[in-house]
Amino acid sequence: MAKILIVGCGAIGYELANLLAQAGHDVTGLKRNPPVANTEKVKFIRADITSSADLEGLATDFEHIFFIVSADGRNENSYHDIYETGINNLLNRFAQAPTKAAWIFVSSTSVYAQSQGEWVDEDSVTVPTKTTSLKIVNAEQKLMADNLANVVVRFSGIYGRGREYLLKMARQTPVIQQHPPYYTNRIHQRDCVGVLMFLLEQRLAGVKLEQCYLASDNDPARLWDVITWMTETLNCDPPIAKNSEENSEKNKRCRNDRLKKLGYRFIYPDFKTGYSELV
């Protein structure tokens, strides 16, 4: 049994917390607004990581820490609060621990600035043009330097119940770039939980982990193909082709070879498998 802290218990963190508790681990969730009452075996602490005072009473004897926090908004201040102030407050708090806990830090493929359909993996350069993504890169580097046992997991676009942006787009006869190809990368939220659970299990089994894993499904498909399939499945009007954009953002293809080589098998290996359930 391991003593585990999950910082941020939204949909992914909450499901992970319950699965870990069911597996027999001692799990604590840290959240600004935890559940008022629950019957799970997960303990909750009410705290805001942007406040050092909120963390003063937090135990420091956790063996493993998951960081699964999202910024409140897509602006520099929100990202600064989470990925600078929040991370610094947590590191300062756990600097007092007798032994270092091993982190698994949830990051994003937005750290890649490649935009011409290039393939990217864990060794690709991360020099994003957006200041918000740069905040994430800096947090990654800080954590990896703090402890060689810390692991960064870069999720691509997350979808699933409650995350149905592309399905909503498909229903609105969208104007989509067809040529040159505009690629999309995604991961089902159940696979997000699965990847995090899998990495902890590997660590507990004594497997030496890399410090970075890119987590995206097996099919970095063209957005045109994804939306066309959705409109056909939903019996909606097909998308409309638009002129190409030379400087499209986020147009890259993500490799997941390192994660699969470690042994992870995706529950939803491609968009058709995942979206078929949602449809």
Image (cartoon, grey):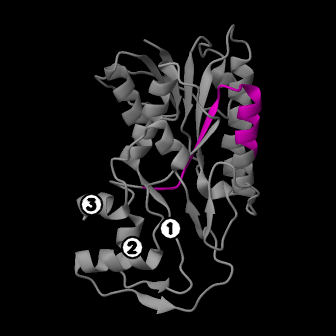
Is the C-beta separation of discs 2 and 3 under 8 Å? no
The crowding category of the residue bearing disc 2, from other C-alpha atoms within 10 Å (few below 14, some 14 to 19, many at least 20), is: some
Pointers 1 and 2 in contact (CB under 8 A)?
Answer: yes
**178 versus 8 height, above or below:** below
Label 1 near label 3: C-beta < 8 Å? no
Numbered disc 1: secondary structure: loop
Judge by depth and name the residue closer to the eye, 121 or 230: 121
Residue marked by disc 2 = 226
Q: Residue at x 49, y 41 (%)?
A: 261
Is residue 171 something that shows in the picture?
no
* Camera sees residue 179: yes
In the image as oriented, which residue stretches furthest toward the top? 98
Which residue is tagged 1?
Answer: 184
Q: Nearer the viewer, mark 2 or mark 3?
A: 2
Distance Cα–Cα, label 3 vs label 1: 18 Å
> What residue is rendered at 33% in x and 47% in y?
267
Which of the pair 276/160 is nearer the observer? 276
As measured in the structure, the alpha-carbon distance from the residue carrying label 1 to the one carrying label 2 is 9 Å
At which x and y percent is residue 81? 69, 43
Q: Quadrant of the N terminus?
A: top left
Of callouts 2 and 3, which one flags the residue occurring earlier in the amino acid sequence? 2
Count residues near mark 1 (Cα–Cα under 10 Å), then give few for <14, some for 14-19, many for 20+.
many
The three-letter amino acid code for the residue at tag 3 is: Leu
Q: Name the residue carrying label 3.
A: 278
The amino acid pointed to by label 2 is Val
Q: Amino acid at mark 1?
A: Thr
